[in-house]
Image: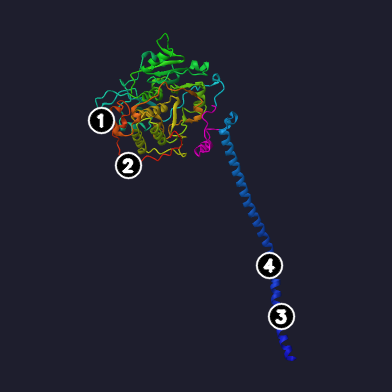
Amino acid sequence: MDNDGHPSVSLRASRRPDRLNNNFEIKDGGDGFFDSDKSSSDYSIKIIWKRGFVRLLLVGGILWMLLILSVLLFHIWTCQSSLVFLSAICNKDSTVFQMLHTMGLVTPPHRCSIPLANDPEKVVIPEKKSPSKFVQSLSYFEEDDINTNGSESSPLFGGHQSWKQREESFKLKSTMKVHCGFIQNGGAEMSHKDKQYVKKCKFVVASGIFDGYDTPHQPSNISPRSKKLFCFLMVVDEVSLKFIKQNVSVKEDNEGGEWVGIWRIILLKNPPYDEPRRNGKVPKILTHRLFPQALYSIWIDGKMELIVDPLLMLERYLWRGKHTFAIAQHKHHRNIYEEADSNKRRKRYARPLIDHQMKIYRYEGLDPWTPLKQTKSDVPEGAIIIREHTPLNNLFNCLWFNEVNLFTPRDQLSFGFVVYRLKNTFKFFMFPNCEYNSIFILHPHTREHSSKIEWVKSLNEFKGNNSGLKESRGGLGLWSTYPADLTSVVLPRVERTSKAG
């Protein structure tokens, strides 16, 4: 019995410290228990807050994205709508529209309403000229430099511009002298009576017909104020004047001036080029030289009938936005290399010569157009040009014409290049193509234009009996030695994004 009792006493004795220890652990851990409960509660609240915040962010982001998507869809809907009210809401000049157009989500309409002022009589004409930036004084070469020419050839309308002179002409200075057509005895002479008439013209609407491809189309919707303010000048060659007299009534005034309706005929004798397309670029690009007293001019191609008041055009495209040069965006192309590819496919000029011009432009650093460029497009619709005759604009016209004179007569290929070479100092307003199409009614040519040089696919076709395909007074830069090796120049790859290219 005693033996049985000893283990129990010792066992109880051994258990006491454990109990004491357990008691102490409980007591010591009493506050810890409540603290852990409290901390776990705080932790749970933090978790809930974090999850709620993340959910709030996600919901807010989704709602924001849905809002943006809704706005974009509404923008697309209004821009594509045939309803006038909804179409008017669409801002076709906006960055959003340009982005959607680049992504292929929006197709600009062929025509759209032009936000014109209501009344030509209330349009305020600026009293002062726009300030002259970069170029203060501009003069022109009137004779060929013998050292530059280096030959006994007859004077050329565009002169014998050297590659060095061309390069220097792109460097802006306060005072500049450049080639700008109208070299003495180079052709395109105007009669004394016509020179006297245009001296009084401060506001000009100009057009041109060469080689008898069109007849004058009378403008419509012209206000009485614009009829008094503007000179409507139709520049023609002798072939076209003869054709016009055979098909349209031509009247003569007391000073010997010839008129077709509102158009005053301006005859240019001795066309400077063999190619009619190149002759047409003289009044189109060098308007400031033909009509030196003009402050403003609007050029419209001879195949077009103007249906918008010219004073309202100046207000819309120049004065309202404080622009000095306005031209429309091309309907299909923004990239010059894409436009060149289209010209080759549609046989607008000899393919190897277009390639040669593009290789020169590529060698001189012209990159394909991207949305990162500061311009909406490198390719314009050149059939309508709206200008204030400032020194910088006049210089741009000269440089643009020099490219047309040296290379192909396709002026849309050289416009963006000259903008690039002037390093964004030349600012212009490129307005939507749908507005461009609302300015005129297009009439077909009286006959189709066709030139053998347009069908040339290889330089070998210019050799032997076909050497006469070469133009003798224009495009000479395509045949003179360029001061650099172009054999390694690779033209950018072109993606044909439209039927036109």
* Residue 115 figure quarter: top right
Please say whether residue 104 is one of the residues in the magenta stretch. Answer: yes
Mark with earlier residue (4, 1): 4
Q: Residues within 10 Å of mark 1 (few under 14, many from 20)?
A: few
Quadrant housing the C terminus: top left
- Horizontal side of residue 6 vs 321, given as left or right: right
The residue drawn where x is 70% and y is 81% is 15
The residue drawn where x is 71% and y is 80% is 16
Q: CA distance from mark 4 to mark 3?
A: 24 Å
Q: Which residue is mark 4?
A: 32
**Which residue is at the front of the view, 15 or 303?**
303
Q: Which residue is mark 2?
A: 488
Q: Which residues are magenta?
A: 91-114
Q: Amino acid at mark 2?
A: Ser
Mark with earlier residue (2, 4): 4
Mark with earlier residue (3, 2): 3
Task: State the count of labels.
Answer: 4
**Residue 436: where, in percent of width, then height?**
49, 27
Query: Callout 4: helix, strand or loop?
Result: helix
Q: Are marks 3 and 2 in contact (CB under 8 Å)?
A: no
Quadrant housing the N terminus: bottom right
- Mark 1 or 3: in front is 1
Q: CA distance from mark 1 to mark 3?
A: 126 Å
Q: Which residue is mark 3?
A: 16
Query: Callout 1: helix, strand or loop?
Result: helix
Q: CA distance from mark 2 to mark 4?
A: 82 Å
Mark with earlier residue (2, 1): 1
